[in-house]
Image (cartoon, rainbow, N blue to C red):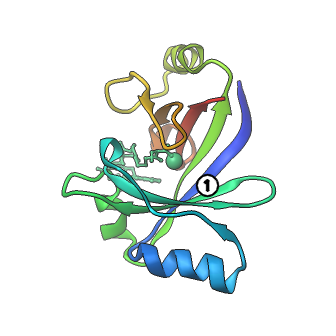
Amino acid sequence: MIGRLNHVAIAVPDLDAAAAQYRDTLGAEVGPPQPEPDHGVTVVFITLPNTKIELLHPLGADSPINGFLEKNPSGGIHHICYEVDDILAARDALKASGARVLGSGEPKIGAHGKPVLFLHPKDFTGTLVELEQA
Ligand SMILES: CC[C@@H](C(=O)O)C(=O)SCCNC(=O)CCNC(=O)[C@H](O)C(C)(C)COP(=O)(O)OP(=O)(O)OC[C@H]1O[C@@H](n2cnc3c(N)ncnc32)[C@H](O)[C@@H]1OP(=O)(O)O
Ligand SMILES: [Co+2]
């Protein structure tokens, strides 16, 4: 079902500092901050030869990453995103297998303008999984 690794997301307490570290210390190609109000985060994408890193910072009091950063104040790996050819078919198959799809269960438009869904970390070996329509 899952295809390419689209991105690994890292929640960070200071977005400018993290972006500068990837750009200046690690020599990576770093994009601009991108507010995503529908998701309660601001993101910065880092383009690597084989995948992307998504730096995440809370946007608003109800951000879904507030709790994560409270527990991990220095930041940490927050989720991994896999591409799927048919996100509705993937969702239905995963639900039938007993996995919990987060939120309303309907895909939202993600940072790349494509439908995304999230799967509960407790159902995937402690890892929050994002699915993105390829
Ligand atoms: C920019 C758009 C998009 C893209 O296109 O790329 C994005 O990436 S948006 C990214 C942010 N959005 C989301 O994360 C949406 C889905 N997330 C959620 O709905 C919630 O964050 C959550 C996963 C349900 C967690 O909610 P929270 O209230 O913070 O925690 P809980 O208390 O409910 O947690 C239960 C349990 O799970 C553990 N946990 C929480 N987050 C993670 C995580 N990221 N990775 C691994 N484990 C996680 C948490 O520690 C709890 O465990 P116990 O303490 O053992 O009970
Ligand atoms: Co993501």
The amino acid marked with disc number 1 is Val
Identify the residue at the far right of this view.
Answer: 49
Spot occupied by residue 56 in the image (x, y as percentages of width and height): 45, 61
Identify the residue at the far front of this view.
Answer: 32
Task: Identify which residue, 107 or 19, lies in the foreground.
Answer: 19
Q: Residue at x 54, y 49 (%)?
A: 127
> Where, by quadrant of the figure, is residue 131 drawn?
top right
Local packing at callout 1 (Cα closer than 10 Å; few below 14, some 14-19, many 20+) is many
- Asked whether, in this view, residue 82 is left or right of residue 78, the answer is right
How many marks are shown on the rendered structure? 1
Quadrant showing the N terminus: top right
Q: Which residue in the protein does label 1 denote? A: 8
- Asked whether, in this view, residue 60 is left or right of residue 44, the answer is left
Q: Residue at x 35, y 44 (%)?
A: 39
Spot occupied by residue 65 in the image (x, y as percentages of width and height): 35, 57
Judged from the image, the secondary structure of the residue bearing numbered disc 1 is strand
Q: Residue at x 57, y 15 (%)?
A: 93
Identify the residue at the far bottom of this view.
Answer: 25
Quadrant showing the C terminus: top right
- Asked whether, in this view, residue 63 is left or right of residue 12, the answer is left
Above or below residue 24? Residue 110 is above
Task: Identify which residue, 85 or 68, lies in the foreground.
Answer: 85
Determine if the C-beta at disc 1 is less than 8 A from ligand 2: no
Q: Residue at x 29, y 58 (%)?
A: 59
Spot occupied by residue 26 in the image (x, y as percentages of width and height): 70, 80
